[in-house]
Structures are given as C-alpha cells and as structure tokens.
Image (tube, rainbow, N blue to C red):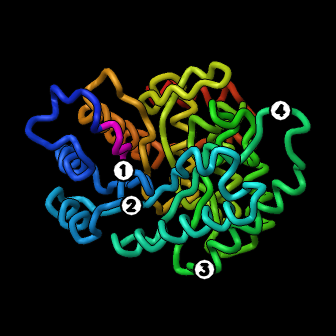
Amino acid sequence: FASRLNSMKDRRDLAGDTADDVLGWVARQGTIAGLDHVDFNFPQHLAGLDAGAVAAALDDAGLTCGAVCLRYPSPEFSAGALTHPDAAVRAKAVALTVEACDWAAKLGTDEVVVWSAFDGYDYAFQCDYDDLWARLVASFRAVCDARPATRVSLEFKPTDEHTRWFAVPSTGAALLLCADVDRANFGLTLDVGHCLAAGENPAQSVAAVAARGRLFGVQLNDGYTRLGAEDGLIFGSVHALAAREVVYWLRRARFAGHVYFDTFPRNEDPVRECELNIRQVRRLYDAAGDLDVADAQRRHDALGVLELLEARGDL
C-alpha cells in the first residue's frame, strides 16, 4: 500500500515533531500502520533533493518507493506537455519523464506514473484530434524506448479544471493508446475516482485492462460523482458495492502491483484516514476469496448476486 504524500501537509496539529517538508512527510507516513510504500510526485517532491537522502529517509521510516509520478509544471506546459504544439516543448516533457524514470531507478522502483493536467483541450475546434493523438503516441514511445526497464503507465482522467477534455478521456481510449504505443513497458494506472468521473464502472475497467495485461497500477478513492468533481474520499465510503467489486476483480485478475490511495483528507487525520483505507481493502480482499458469484453471473441474475451478498452480510 501507498498513500498520497501531500496529505501529510494537512492537520499539522497532529503531526508531532515531524518536519513540514518532503522528508518530514515521509517520516510521518512511516507512522501509518500497514503502509509499505511512498509515491513521489516529480519534479515537485524530488527537485533539489539528493537521492541518497531520500533513500535514507525511506529507510528510517521503514518504507520503500512505490512509484515516481509525473506532475508537469506550469506555466511551461500549460498548453500541453507530451502533446504540446511546439516540438521543443514536447521534447522537454519527454526529457522530464525520462528523468523521472532515472529517479525511480535510484530509489529502487521500476514504476513511473504519468498524469498530465494539461494534455487536452477546453473548446471545440481548439486542436486537431489526430495530431493530438499522434503526438501523445510518439511521446510515450520515446519515453518507453529510452528507458525499457521502466514500467511507464498513464493515469487517465476525463476532465480537470486545467483541461476540460483530456486527450485520453476513458478506459477504452486508454486501451487504444496502449495498442498504438505498442510497447511492452507501457500500461495504465486506473484511478477509481477518474473512472467514476468518466461515467464508467471501475470494476469493469479493471477487468478490461487486466485482461489485456496492461494493469500496471491502481489508485483507490471514492466520491459523489458530481460533474467535474474529484472528491478523493475514503475508498468505499460512497460506492460501497462498487468498491467491493473493484477489489473482487483485482483479486480475480491476480493484480500484483501496489495499491495507492489517492484521497484528500484535508479535514481528517491523514494517518488514521490511510489506516482505515488499508483495513477496508484488506477486509474486502479477504471477503472476495470465497465469494462465488459464477453461477449467478452465468444467468446475469442480479437478484441472485445481491441475495448472495446479503446472506454473507456483505450488502
């Protein structure tokens, strides 16, 4: 398990004597029972730091690096990062992504997750969709070819305040991108909240991506799915049955990556909030072990499945 490092900035009244900086946030995450990894945003968390100092902080906290996650800075990439209309700016975005791969290697992981707030558009006729797609494919190919030992994954998000329409707005489009990039070290990181925002069933997205061998990462959270909103709530706190099915499919697909909690506990104790997320997933994972819905699914029997869950106390 890993959780959002930036959450350690919040509720400093509960942070004890841990410093309010990146290494201090790592130390605070080390107090979370059941946490294994830290995922760092790049360059925001790591710029200016020494890799040895970061590794030492992880070791002191009893944690390891799970992934390095791209956050292309503005204003340089506000008109696009991997899809920027200027080839020189795109080259800078590719170079920054390759640098993130190098940081991942220094910190002992092979996972790099790409989420770009800026690779998309806001208005009709703003961009040529064919060109936008071709640039994205070429950029990801360049990164994957430069660092073939790194597992590079796209975290798609359908909409954001910075990009009303993302270049890859759905799970289906993300799988099409995987096919077009056509690199063994390119895959997807699925965020439950992003799937909900796209009007998708997250469990079906997990099943589809896992079946094609492209499920590199998972980010768990929940939300009320209001238009354009990403609430970042505790996993299963709103969509309890959907959360149960997500974990069922993760277990069924034998997902072996780490689970990241992309939640925003701005008013809650972020340590207790993360521990609750961990307990929730472990409970759902254990319950999925003997959940036999095959017979009901063969008949598409909705009531049969719900009655089975009811009898188990899972509904």
Q: Is residue 145 left or right of residue 248?
A: right
Which residue type does callout 2 highlight?
Gly
Name the residue tied to disc 4. Answer: 123
Query: Percent from the top left, x then y, of residue 180?
Result: 80, 66
Report the Cα–Cα distance between label 4 and label 2. 36 Å
Query: In the drawing, what numbered circle is on residue 66?
Result: 2
Q: Is residue 278 left or right of residue 313?
A: left
- The numbered mark, 1 or 3, whose residue comes first in the sequence reads 1
Q: Secondary structure at mark 4?
A: loop
Q: Which mark is residue 146?
A: 3
Neighbours of disc 3 within 10 Å: few (<14), some (14-19), many (20+): some
Residue topped by disc 1 = 2
| Figure quadrant of residue 132 | bottom right
Task: State yes or no: discs 2 and 3 in contact (Cβ < 8 Å).
Answer: no
Q: Residue at x 90, y 55 (%)?
A: 130
> Could you tell me which residue is drawn at 27 percent across and 67 percent down?
50
Q: Residues within 10 Å of mark 2 (few under 14, many from 20)?
A: many
Dots 1, 2 in contact, CB < 8 A: yes
Q: Residues within 10 Å of mark 1 (few under 14, many from 20)?
A: many
**191 magenta-colored:** no
Secondary structure of the residue carrying tag 1 is: strand
Q: Residue at x 8, y 39 (%)?
A: 17
- x and y percentages locating residue 243 in the rendered image: 52, 35
> What distance separates the C-alpha of mark 1 from that of mark 3?
27 Å
Amino acid tagged 3: Ala
Sequence-wise first label, 2 or 3: 2
State yes or no: residue 5 in magenta.
yes
Q: Start and end of the magenta stretch?
A: 1-7
